[in-house]
């Protein structure tokens, strides 16, 4: 026999209407009572009838996750495409953040590049109460189109004025990476950055410049190359330096995809990591720990970004007039085997 809302009410020692208020995230119920009700729900294994509740409350309790990609028709695992580790790791955090809530999640991959006036199908459906927008591959026009939908949105991975956002301090990423390599005696670093048009790419450069100034290094000690976030992008960028006769003592990649591509080029050239050259990545994903040698990285804390985004989006749904949140998370170094330490 299935558990009913009345069973939950009896277990928690409250009324049926109180249980209903808690399920619908009402702020009218005291925190202690909310806790008792949620404990009863978990103990009894109660699952609300979402379809019935949608009819009575005009709420769907459905959220959308829109992952922005450069090419919807290319395999995300191709060497020439942007590896979608950001989607995988961040969505894990979102799923975790939605535990013990009444929200369900629908996912769609979408490319702004193919039609800037297009709107993701999930948004056009009109059933969403809020949206997670993952990735920085969007332009101002797309944001203007999105604003017209009047739908709560949290951007994950970059900031945009007027929108709730969860991102990593990109300036600190550049600073931490350059500082760590300088501290270990590296004086000729190839920094393979993302697209020059990306605001995050520019922030990483600012961080590198801060480290150069702090350590009184020659500005030419860090060579900057811009590419896309694919493995092929990292491979081609480092290959172009190699063809020019440049032999850096360290490579710093702006994503795990870029860094993996650079490592493939070094393998083909017979260059040993970290004996002959150090390699430092940014992001931390499946690619990093499975690399050989295991990749030393600056951690983007992607799962935590997903969890934080859940709290922000649910708060925005419940409090539409709340102050805009722009959370800039601190990156951190994970020490593995790809950087020569002096």
Image: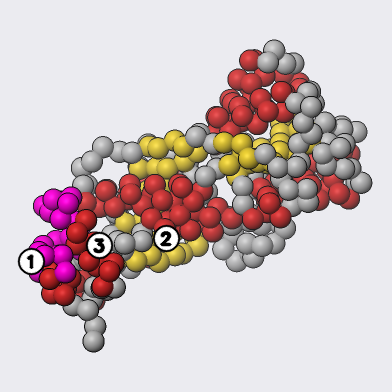
Element at badge 3? Answer: helix
Whether tag 1 and tag 2 are in contact, CB under 8 A, the answer is: no
Decide which of 185, 244 is in the foreground and name it: 185
Give the mark nearest the N terminus, 1 or 3. Answer: 1
Residue 288 is left or right of residue 327, and the answer is: right
Where is residue 146 drawn, in percent x and y? Answer: 36, 52
- The residue to which callout 3 is attached is 39
Whether tag 2 and tag 3 are in contact, CB under 8 A, the answer is: no
Q: Residue at x 61, y 29 (%)?
A: 176
**Are there few (<14), some (14-19), or many (20+) residues within 10 Å of tag 1?**
few
Q: Is residue 218 above or below residue 31?
A: above
Query: Could one spot residue 153 in this view of the protein?
Result: no
- The residue to which callout 1 is attached is 15
Residue at the extreme top? 216
Question: Which span is picked out in magenta?
Answer: 11-34
Q: Is residue 281 magenta?
A: no
């Amino acid at each position: 026999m299935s558990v009913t809302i009345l069973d939950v009410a009896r277990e928690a020692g409250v009324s049926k209407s109180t249980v209903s208020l808690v399920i619908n995230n009402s702020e009218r119920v005291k925190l202690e009572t909310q806790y008792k009700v949620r404990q009863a729900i978990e103990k009894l294994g109660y699952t609300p009838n979402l379809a019935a509740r949608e009819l009575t409350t005009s709420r769907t309790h459905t959220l959308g996750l829109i992952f922005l990609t450069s090419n919807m028709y290319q395999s995300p695992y191709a060497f020439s495409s942007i590896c979608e580790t950001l989607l995988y790791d961040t969505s894990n955090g979102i799923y975790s953040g939605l535990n013990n809530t009444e929200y369900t999640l629908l996912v769609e991959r979408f490319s702004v590049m193919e039609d800037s006036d297009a709107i993701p199908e999930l948004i056009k459906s009109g059933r969403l109460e809020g949206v997670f927008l993952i990735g920085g591959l969007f332009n101002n026009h797309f944001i203007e189109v999105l604003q017209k939908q009047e739908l709560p949105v949290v951007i994950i991975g970059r900031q945009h004025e007027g929108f709730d956002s969860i991102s990593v301090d990109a300036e600190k990423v550049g600073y931490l990476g350059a500082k760590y390599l300088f501290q270990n005696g590296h004086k000729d670093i190839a920094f393979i950055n993302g697209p020059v048009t990306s605001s995050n790419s520019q922030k990483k450069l600012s961080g590198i410049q801060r480290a150069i100034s702090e350590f009184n290094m020659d500005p030419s000690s860090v060579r900057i190359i811009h590419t896309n976030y694919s493995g092929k992008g990292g491979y081609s960028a480092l290959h172009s330096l190699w063809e020019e006769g440049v032999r850096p003592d360290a490579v710093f990649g702006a994503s795990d995809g870029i860094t993996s591509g650079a490592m493939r080029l070094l393998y083909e050239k017979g260059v040993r990591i970290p004996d002959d050259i150090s390699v430092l990545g940014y992001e931390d994903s499946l690619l990093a720990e499975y690399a050989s040698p295991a990749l030393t990285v600056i951690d983007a804390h992607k799962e935590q970004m997903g969890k934080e985004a859940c709290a922000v989006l649910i708060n925005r749904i419940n409090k539409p007039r709340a102050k805009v949140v722009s959370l800039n998370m601190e990156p951190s170094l994970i020490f593995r085997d790809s950087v020569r330490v002096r």
